[in-house]
Image: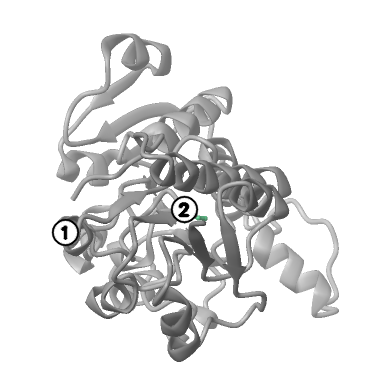
Protein backbone atom coordinates (compact mmCIF):
# COMPACT_ATOMS: atom_id res chain seq x y z
CA UNK A 1 0.00 0.00 0.00
CA UNK A 2 1.27 3.48 -0.88
CA UNK A 3 2.19 5.89 1.92
CA UNK A 4 1.16 9.51 1.59
CA UNK A 5 2.57 12.25 3.85
CA UNK A 6 0.64 15.48 4.25
CA UNK A 7 2.90 18.15 5.74
CA UNK A 8 0.16 20.36 7.22
CA UNK A 9 -3.53 20.61 7.98
CA UNK A 10 -5.73 20.33 4.88
CA UNK A 11 -9.54 20.07 4.51
CA UNK A 12 -11.23 16.66 4.88
CA UNK A 13 -12.23 16.71 1.20
CA UNK A 14 -8.58 16.18 0.33
CA UNK A 15 -7.88 13.64 3.06
CA UNK A 16 -10.92 11.57 1.98
CA UNK A 17 -9.56 11.27 -1.55
CA UNK A 18 -6.08 10.43 -0.27
CA UNK A 19 -7.33 7.74 2.12
CA UNK A 20 -8.83 5.89 -0.82
CA UNK A 21 -5.37 5.84 -2.46
CA UNK A 22 -3.16 4.73 0.38
CA UNK A 23 -2.14 5.04 4.00
CA UNK A 24 -2.19 8.70 4.97
CA UNK A 25 -0.06 10.37 7.63
CA UNK A 26 -0.89 14.04 8.16
CA UNK A 27 0.72 16.66 10.40
CA UNK A 28 -2.27 17.91 12.36
CA UNK A 29 -1.22 21.20 13.91
CA UNK A 30 -1.22 24.83 12.83
CA UNK A 31 2.46 25.36 13.53
CA UNK A 32 4.91 24.17 10.86
CA UNK A 33 5.95 20.53 10.95
CA UNK A 34 9.40 20.15 12.60
CA UNK A 35 12.05 18.99 10.12
CA UNK A 36 12.91 15.84 12.06
CA UNK A 37 9.28 14.71 12.21
CA UNK A 38 8.82 15.48 8.54
CA UNK A 39 11.99 13.63 7.54
CA UNK A 40 11.03 10.54 9.57
CA UNK A 41 7.69 10.40 7.77
CA UNK A 42 9.14 11.11 4.33
CA UNK A 43 11.60 8.21 4.69
CA UNK A 44 8.95 5.70 3.68
CA UNK A 45 6.62 7.95 1.67
CA UNK A 46 5.54 7.50 -1.95
CA UNK A 47 3.80 10.87 -2.13
CA UNK A 48 3.93 14.20 -0.32
CA UNK A 49 1.16 16.77 -0.16
CA UNK A 50 2.77 20.12 0.64
CA UNK A 51 1.75 23.66 1.52
CA UNK A 52 3.25 26.90 0.24
CA UNK A 53 5.05 27.29 3.58
CA UNK A 54 7.09 24.11 2.95
CA UNK A 55 10.46 24.35 1.26
CA UNK A 56 10.77 21.40 -1.07
CA UNK A 57 14.50 21.44 -1.71
CA UNK A 58 17.36 18.95 -1.80
CA UNK A 59 17.06 18.24 1.93
CA UNK A 60 13.35 17.50 1.63
CA UNK A 61 13.87 15.26 -1.40
CA UNK A 62 16.82 13.45 0.18
CA UNK A 63 14.62 12.63 3.17
CA UNK A 64 12.05 11.03 0.87
CA UNK A 65 13.99 8.81 -1.55
CA UNK A 66 10.83 6.91 -2.55
CA UNK A 67 8.77 9.99 -3.43
CA UNK A 68 7.00 9.85 -6.78
CA UNK A 69 5.00 13.04 -6.46
CA UNK A 70 4.96 16.32 -4.56
CA UNK A 71 1.46 17.79 -4.75
CA UNK A 72 1.47 21.43 -3.67
CA UNK A 73 -1.83 22.73 -2.32
CA UNK A 74 -1.38 26.11 -4.03
CA UNK A 75 -1.25 27.47 -7.53
CA UNK A 76 2.12 29.11 -6.82
CA UNK A 77 5.00 26.67 -6.51
CA UNK A 78 7.99 28.94 -5.91
CA UNK A 79 8.47 26.99 -2.65
CA UNK A 80 9.47 23.94 -4.71
CA UNK A 81 12.75 23.31 -6.47
CA UNK A 82 11.08 21.86 -9.55
CA UNK A 83 14.37 21.15 -11.34
CA UNK A 84 15.64 19.12 -8.36
CA UNK A 85 12.37 17.18 -8.33
CA UNK A 86 12.63 16.47 -12.01
CA UNK A 87 16.23 15.24 -11.64
CA UNK A 88 14.98 12.71 -9.10
CA UNK A 89 11.99 11.73 -11.22
CA UNK A 90 9.52 13.31 -8.78
CA UNK A 91 6.43 14.80 -10.43
CA UNK A 92 5.30 18.20 -9.12
CA UNK A 93 1.69 19.33 -9.27
CA UNK A 94 -0.17 22.50 -8.23
CA UNK A 95 -3.79 23.63 -7.97
CA UNK A 96 -4.61 26.09 -10.76
CA UNK A 97 -8.18 27.03 -11.63
CA UNK A 98 -9.93 26.25 -8.38
CA UNK A 99 -8.72 29.40 -6.62
CA UNK A 100 -9.07 31.83 -9.52
CA UNK A 101 -12.33 33.44 -8.41
CA UNK A 102 -11.44 33.64 -4.72
CA UNK A 103 -8.12 35.33 -5.46
CA UNK A 104 -9.59 37.72 -8.02
CA UNK A 105 -12.35 38.59 -5.54
CA UNK A 106 -9.71 39.43 -2.95
CA UNK A 107 -7.70 41.55 -5.40
CA UNK A 108 -10.87 43.51 -6.22
CA UNK A 109 -11.71 43.83 -2.53
CA UNK A 110 -8.23 45.16 -1.79
CA UNK A 111 -8.53 47.59 -4.68
CA UNK A 112 -11.74 48.95 -3.19
CA UNK A 113 -10.29 48.98 0.32
CA UNK A 114 -7.26 51.02 -0.58
CA UNK A 115 -8.89 53.40 -3.04
CA UNK A 116 -11.81 54.10 -0.67
CA UNK A 117 -9.64 54.17 2.48
CA UNK A 118 -11.71 51.51 4.21
CA UNK A 119 -8.96 50.20 6.48
CA UNK A 120 -8.23 53.73 7.61
CA UNK A 121 -11.94 54.34 8.32
CA UNK A 122 -12.21 51.13 10.27
CA UNK A 123 -9.17 51.97 12.36
CA UNK A 124 -10.58 55.41 13.10
CA UNK A 125 -13.81 54.01 14.46
CA UNK A 126 -12.18 51.19 16.42
CA UNK A 127 -9.77 53.68 18.01
CA UNK A 128 -12.78 55.57 19.37
CA UNK A 129 -11.73 58.73 17.51
CA UNK A 130 -14.57 61.29 17.53
CA UNK A 131 -15.89 61.88 14.00
CA UNK A 132 -18.77 63.41 12.14
CA UNK A 133 -19.89 63.10 8.56
CA UNK A 134 -18.22 65.85 6.56
CA UNK A 135 -18.16 66.82 2.90
CA UNK A 136 -14.41 66.44 2.79
CA UNK A 137 -13.97 63.63 5.25
CA UNK A 138 -11.72 60.76 4.16
CA UNK A 139 -12.20 61.20 0.44
CA UNK A 140 -11.01 58.34 -1.70
CA UNK A 141 -10.66 57.77 -5.42
CA UNK A 142 -13.38 56.34 -7.67
CA UNK A 143 -12.63 53.53 -10.09
CA UNK A 144 -14.93 54.47 -12.96
CA UNK A 145 -12.98 55.36 -16.08
CA UNK A 146 -9.67 54.58 -14.35
CA UNK A 147 -7.11 52.17 -15.76
CA UNK A 148 -6.29 48.86 -14.12
CA UNK A 149 -2.84 47.63 -15.12
CA UNK A 150 -2.53 43.87 -14.69
CA UNK A 151 0.98 42.46 -14.51
CA UNK A 152 0.58 38.75 -15.32
CA UNK A 153 -2.53 38.07 -17.37
CA UNK A 154 -3.13 34.44 -16.40
CA UNK A 155 -6.44 33.10 -15.15
CA UNK A 156 -6.43 35.26 -12.00
CA UNK A 157 -5.41 38.40 -13.89
CA UNK A 158 -8.23 37.83 -16.37
CA UNK A 159 -10.78 37.18 -13.62
CA UNK A 160 -9.70 40.39 -11.89
CA UNK A 161 -9.98 42.31 -15.17
CA UNK A 162 -13.54 40.97 -15.58
CA UNK A 163 -14.42 42.29 -12.15
CA UNK A 164 -12.73 45.64 -12.77
CA UNK A 165 -14.69 46.03 -16.02
CA UNK A 166 -17.88 45.73 -13.99
CA UNK A 167 -16.62 48.69 -11.93
CA UNK A 168 -16.13 50.73 -15.11
CA UNK A 169 -12.35 50.42 -15.31
CA UNK A 170 -10.33 50.12 -18.49
CA UNK A 171 -7.71 47.40 -18.72
CA UNK A 172 -4.05 47.41 -19.75
CA UNK A 173 -1.87 44.38 -19.18
CA UNK A 174 1.72 43.28 -19.30
CA UNK A 175 2.43 39.63 -20.00
CA UNK A 176 5.02 37.44 -21.66
CA UNK A 177 2.60 36.99 -24.56
CA UNK A 178 -0.70 38.45 -25.66
CA UNK A 179 -3.86 36.70 -24.48
CA UNK A 180 -6.14 35.45 -27.25
CA UNK A 181 -8.00 38.00 -29.31
CA UNK A 182 -11.45 37.02 -27.97
CA UNK A 183 -10.31 37.58 -24.37
CA UNK A 184 -8.68 40.89 -25.27
CA UNK A 185 -11.91 41.97 -26.92
CA UNK A 186 -14.13 40.84 -24.02
CA UNK A 187 -11.96 42.73 -21.54
CA UNK A 188 -11.24 45.63 -23.85
CA UNK A 189 -7.67 44.95 -22.76
CA UNK A 190 -4.50 46.17 -24.46
CA UNK A 191 -1.05 44.66 -24.11
CA UNK A 192 1.56 47.27 -23.14
CA UNK A 193 5.18 47.34 -22.05
CA UNK A 194 5.94 47.33 -18.33
CA UNK A 195 7.03 50.97 -18.28
CA UNK A 196 3.89 52.15 -20.04
CA UNK A 197 1.73 50.09 -17.70
CA UNK A 198 3.40 51.59 -14.63
CA UNK A 199 3.27 55.13 -15.99
CA UNK A 200 -0.37 55.10 -17.11
CA UNK A 201 -2.26 52.85 -14.67
CA UNK A 202 -4.34 54.13 -11.77
CA UNK A 203 -4.23 50.73 -10.10
CA UNK A 204 -1.35 48.30 -10.74
CA UNK A 205 -2.18 44.72 -9.79
CA UNK A 206 0.46 42.00 -9.50
CA UNK A 207 -0.84 38.64 -10.71
CA UNK A 208 2.34 37.05 -12.05
CA UNK A 209 4.23 34.05 -10.65
CA UNK A 210 7.29 34.67 -8.51
CA UNK A 211 10.63 33.63 -10.03
CA UNK A 212 14.14 35.04 -10.42
CA UNK A 213 12.74 37.07 -13.31
CA UNK A 214 10.06 38.75 -11.19
CA UNK A 215 12.10 39.21 -7.98
CA UNK A 216 11.75 42.91 -7.03
CA UNK A 217 10.02 43.64 -10.33
CA UNK A 218 8.48 46.49 -8.37
CA UNK A 219 11.51 48.26 -6.96
CA UNK A 220 12.23 51.94 -6.29
CA UNK A 221 12.66 52.68 -10.01
CA UNK A 222 9.36 50.99 -10.90
CA UNK A 223 7.56 52.84 -8.10
CA UNK A 224 9.04 56.09 -9.40
CA UNK A 225 7.41 55.45 -12.74
CA UNK A 226 3.96 55.18 -11.17
CA UNK A 227 1.71 58.21 -10.87
CA UNK A 228 1.47 59.94 -7.49
CA UNK A 229 -2.25 59.16 -7.54
CA UNK A 230 -1.79 55.46 -8.33
CA UNK A 231 -2.24 52.37 -6.15
CA UNK A 232 -0.37 49.05 -6.03
CA UNK A 233 -2.17 45.78 -5.22
CA UNK A 234 -0.24 42.54 -4.61
CA UNK A 235 -2.04 39.22 -4.30
CA UNK A 236 0.74 37.25 -6.05
CA UNK A 237 3.94 36.78 -4.02
CA UNK A 238 5.64 39.16 -1.63
CA UNK A 239 9.19 39.22 -3.03
CA UNK A 240 7.92 40.59 -6.36
CA UNK A 241 7.92 43.90 -4.46
CA UNK A 242 10.91 45.50 -2.76
CA UNK A 243 9.03 46.13 0.48
CA UNK A 244 11.52 48.68 1.86
CA UNK A 245 11.28 50.71 -1.36
CA UNK A 246 7.50 50.48 -1.23
CA UNK A 247 7.41 51.73 2.37
CA UNK A 248 9.56 54.71 1.36
CA UNK A 249 7.39 55.49 -1.68
CA UNK A 250 4.22 55.32 0.44
CA UNK A 251 5.72 57.45 3.21
CA UNK A 252 6.93 60.10 0.74
CA UNK A 253 3.65 60.16 -1.17
CA UNK A 254 5.38 58.87 -4.31
CA UNK A 255 2.29 56.72 -4.87
CA UNK A 256 -1.14 57.10 -3.29
CA UNK A 257 -1.46 53.72 -1.62
CA UNK A 258 -0.91 49.97 -1.65
CA UNK A 259 -2.82 46.88 -0.61
CA UNK A 260 -0.84 43.75 0.17
CA UNK A 261 -2.01 40.18 0.71
CA UNK A 262 1.54 38.79 0.51
CA UNK A 263 4.85 39.90 1.97
CA UNK A 264 8.51 39.78 1.08
CA UNK A 265 9.51 37.93 4.26
CA UNK A 266 6.17 36.34 5.10
CA UNK A 267 4.81 36.19 7.75
CA UNK A 268 6.94 39.21 8.77
CA UNK A 269 5.84 42.58 7.46
CA UNK A 270 8.30 45.41 6.92
CA UNK A 271 8.03 47.48 10.14
CA UNK A 272 7.87 50.76 8.20
CA UNK A 273 4.61 49.64 6.57
CA UNK A 274 2.85 49.05 9.87
CA UNK A 275 2.59 52.71 10.80
CA UNK A 276 1.37 53.93 7.41
CA UNK A 277 -2.28 54.72 6.84
CA UNK A 278 -2.14 54.44 3.06
CA UNK A 279 -1.44 50.71 3.00
CA UNK A 280 -3.89 47.86 3.52
CA UNK A 281 -2.30 44.72 4.99
CA UNK A 282 -4.01 41.33 5.07
CA UNK A 283 -2.45 37.95 5.94
CA UNK A 284 -2.27 35.98 2.64
CA UNK A 285 -6.01 35.38 2.33
CA UNK A 286 -6.22 35.14 -1.49
CA UNK A 287 -7.63 31.63 -1.59
CA UNK A 288 -9.06 31.65 1.93
CA UNK A 289 -12.66 30.61 1.43
CA UNK A 290 -14.03 27.34 2.78
CA UNK A 291 -15.07 26.19 -0.69
CA UNK A 292 -11.79 27.12 -2.34
CA UNK A 293 -9.54 25.52 0.25
CA UNK A 294 -11.56 22.28 -0.02
CA UNK A 295 -11.31 22.35 -3.81
CA UNK A 296 -7.54 22.97 -3.60
CA UNK A 297 -7.03 20.05 -1.22
CA UNK A 298 -9.18 17.79 -3.38
CA UNK A 299 -7.33 18.69 -6.57
CA UNK A 300 -3.94 18.10 -4.92
CA UNK A 301 -5.20 14.74 -3.64
CA UNK A 302 -6.52 13.74 -7.06
CA UNK A 303 -3.11 14.48 -8.52
CA UNK A 304 -1.56 12.10 -5.99
CA UNK A 305 -4.13 9.42 -6.87
CA UNK A 306 -3.33 9.72 -10.58
CA UNK A 307 0.43 9.43 -10.09
CA UNK A 308 0.21 6.52 -7.66
CA UNK A 309 -2.05 4.73 -10.16
CA UNK A 310 0.56 5.25 -12.87
CA UNK A 311 -1.49 7.79 -14.78
CA UNK A 312 -0.77 11.35 -15.88
CA UNK A 313 -1.38 14.04 -13.21
CA UNK A 314 -4.23 16.48 -13.78
CA UNK A 315 -2.22 19.65 -13.21
CA UNK A 316 1.54 19.07 -13.52
CA UNK A 317 4.01 21.93 -13.39
CA UNK A 318 7.21 22.22 -15.36
CA UNK A 319 10.53 23.78 -14.38
C1 LIG B 1 -1.54 30.06 -4.04
O1 LIG B 1 -2.26 29.08 -4.18
O2 LIG B 1 -0.46 30.19 -4.59
C2 LIG B 1 -2.05 31.13 -3.15
O3 LIG B 1 -1.09 32.04 -2.83
C3 LIG B 1 -2.70 30.53 -1.94
O4 LIG B 1 -3.51 31.50 -1.35
- The residue under label 1 is 83
> Up-down: is 185 above or below 228?
above
Query: As drawn, which residue projects farthest toward the front?
Result: 1
Q: Is mark 2 within 8 Å of ligand 1?
A: yes
Label 1 residue SS? helix
- The residue under label 2 is 74
Is 163 on the left-hand or right-hand side of 216?
right
Quarter residue 78 falls in: bottom left
Q: Nearer the viewer, residue 93 or 127?
A: 93
Q: Nearer the viewer, residue 189 or 176?
A: 176
Q: Is residue 306 visible?
A: yes
The residue drawn where x is 57% and y is 23% is 166
Label 2 residue SS? loop
Residue 111 percent coordinates (x, y): 54, 47
Residue 112 percent coordinates (x, y): 60, 46
Residue 208 percent coordinates (x, y): 31, 47
Q: Nearer the viewer, residue 64 or 298?
A: 64
- The image's mark for residue 95 is none
The tag earlier along the polypeptide, 2 or 1, is 2
Count of all numbered marks drawn on residues in the image? 2
For the residues marked 2 and 1, what is the alpha-carbon distance in whole angstroms?
18 Å
The residue carrying pointer 1 sits among few (fewer than 14), some (14 to 19) or many (20 or more) residues within 10 Å by Cα, namely some
Q: Nearer the viewer, residue 202 or 67?
A: 67
Amino acid sequence: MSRIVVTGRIPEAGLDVLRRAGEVWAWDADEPIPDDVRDRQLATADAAVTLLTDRVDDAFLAAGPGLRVVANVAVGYNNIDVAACRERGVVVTNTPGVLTDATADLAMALTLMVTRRLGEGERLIRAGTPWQWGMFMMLGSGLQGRQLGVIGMGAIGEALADRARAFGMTIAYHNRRAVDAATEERLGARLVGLHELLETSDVVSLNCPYSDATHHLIDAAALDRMQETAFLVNTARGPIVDEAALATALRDGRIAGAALDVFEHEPDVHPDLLGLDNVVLVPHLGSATIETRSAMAELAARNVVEILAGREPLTPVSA
